[in-house]
Amino acid sequence: MQEQKTSVLVVGGGVVGLSSALFLANAGVAVTLVERHPGTSIHPRAWGWYERTLEIFRAAGIEEQVLEAAKGFADHRINGKVVSLLGKEIGRQILPDGDDLRAITPCKHVSLGQDRMEPIVRAAAAAAGAELLFNTGLIDLTQTADGVDAVVVDRVDGVERRIKADYVIAADGARSPLREKLGVGAHGRGAFRHQVSILFRADLTGPLDGRRFSICQIENPEFTAVLGHDDTLTEGTLIVTYKPEDGESVEDFTVDRSIELVRAAIGDPEYPVEIRDVLPWEMAGIVAERLRVDRVFFAGDSAHIVPPIGGYGANLGIHDAHNLAWKLAAVLAGHAGAELLDTYEAERAPIARLTVAQGGLRLAMRAGFATDEQKSQVIDPLAMTLGYRYTPGQPVHPSQLTGEPGTRAPHLWLDGDLESTVDLFGADFVLLAGPDGQAWVEAAQKLAARNEVPVTAFRFGTDLTDRESAFPATYGVAADGAALVRPDGFVAWRSSGSVDQAESELATALSAALSRTDIA
């Protein structure tokens, strides 16, 4: 049996697994990904990507590619209900233009099918040096005191190989064989509905008649469903509910039955339709009991399944990967203590539970049975995606972020080569000092050199110029204060002003942020 060594083994080649591989490879970590399918998903699945996700992709170097790929969906703004595309239109709502968020983030929300997103992330991960093994299934995994032994098999030629890794990221989907193997249960309501996504080809130009739907609900005597279409108007997805309790099953959705349903949604019983695939899935709300078992970490759907109302699921998984990747990189490089990895579950599990709960509330509102109390508990999407925190407390609208430790470092526009403070974060810890905070800059530089800690320091007014001179007020410090920001763009520590022993103060902050006791 062939053997190889890698630092991190990623199991699962969906958008979360591929993002994990990209973030790790960009950080210089040797990473191998295995995925049992021959390629990325052909189903659109997730369609919306929030501003925070674009910030993360911006740091990873693929924001421009994502924006280019999403251009064709920019005018898909009708939220409508029809008897069929060719039939009566029951109602429509034109989705409003997005809020002007330039004071909050340099990035924007985009619509783009996961089938288009995954190839972008895959290509970038490969270019960064990740080894991506598609058509390769995991058949065994054993943890040892100093690593993980995995056995994988090439599903084409049957050749097995052994991969020794320091750590494993399980991004192996909602049914997560790894989570089951390791005996990790899940809490939550479970399945709300059983559904199938029917992926089809058809010329939708005529039936759409100039309309571009974000969401199109089909409601006719034949059935109810949700229909989505791509920007070429040649491919669509019909999402249909089935009820196992009534004896219905996935097997009912034969090619002929699927064609019949798509034609009913279009409104023409003879319309030319080709079925590409039928994908069963559950609309569910669960969170794994644990996000880590020794050297194995769960991310994405293996860690949590979010009801799709609100579009939080895939974004949440990418944020998992982003949180975990810098910590694995720091530990593997010797910059952080192994205890840093304990913070992954401590930080991400509460966010997962909150997000799943929010998805359930939004589903209740969409279905029309939410109580007034439930409606009052719904949190604004911008707060959920840009204003969540890794310290106790509810998310806040990002305009209210003030550099508090545990929250996302606020965006400021910069003059010069970098457009935003967001562009400073990604590789190292970043110390941001006010115009009178040179002592903090010098302390960071000395500590970085003496302790081999990756810290880059900037002073506003000298190294950086923010257009509104708003750094002190925005980050909650005085002109001689400073903030320390983690590689994932979250504030680790701040000092409102100068102190007598800047090196000692900053050493304590870095020790806490990196789970080390030897920084001095």
Image (cartoon, helix red, strand yellow):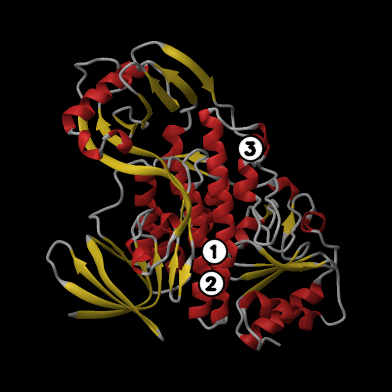
Looking at the rendering, which quadrant does residue 158 occupy? bottom left
Q: Residues within 10 Å of mark 2 (few under 14, many from 20)?
A: many
Vertical placement of residue 94 versus 467, above or below: above
Indicate the quadrant containing the C terminus: top left, top right, bottom left or bottom right: bottom right
Q: Are marks 2 and 1 in contact (CB under 8 Å)?
A: yes
Can residue 322 be seen here? The reply is yes
Give amino acid for label 3. Answer: Gln
Looking at the rendering, which quadrant does residue 282 occupy? top left
Give amino acid for label 1. Answer: Asn
- Residue at 34 percent across and 51 percent down: it is 119
Q: Residues within 10 Å of mark 3 (few under 14, many from 20)?
A: some
Q: Earlier in the sequence, mark 1 or mark 3?
A: 1
Front position among marks 1 and 3: 3
Q: Which mark is residue 374?
A: 3
Front position among marks 3 and 2: 3
For mark 1, what is the residue? Answer: 323
Give amino acid for label 2. Answer: Lys
Q: Which mark is residue 327?
A: 2
- Residue at 47 percent across and 69 percent down: it is 292
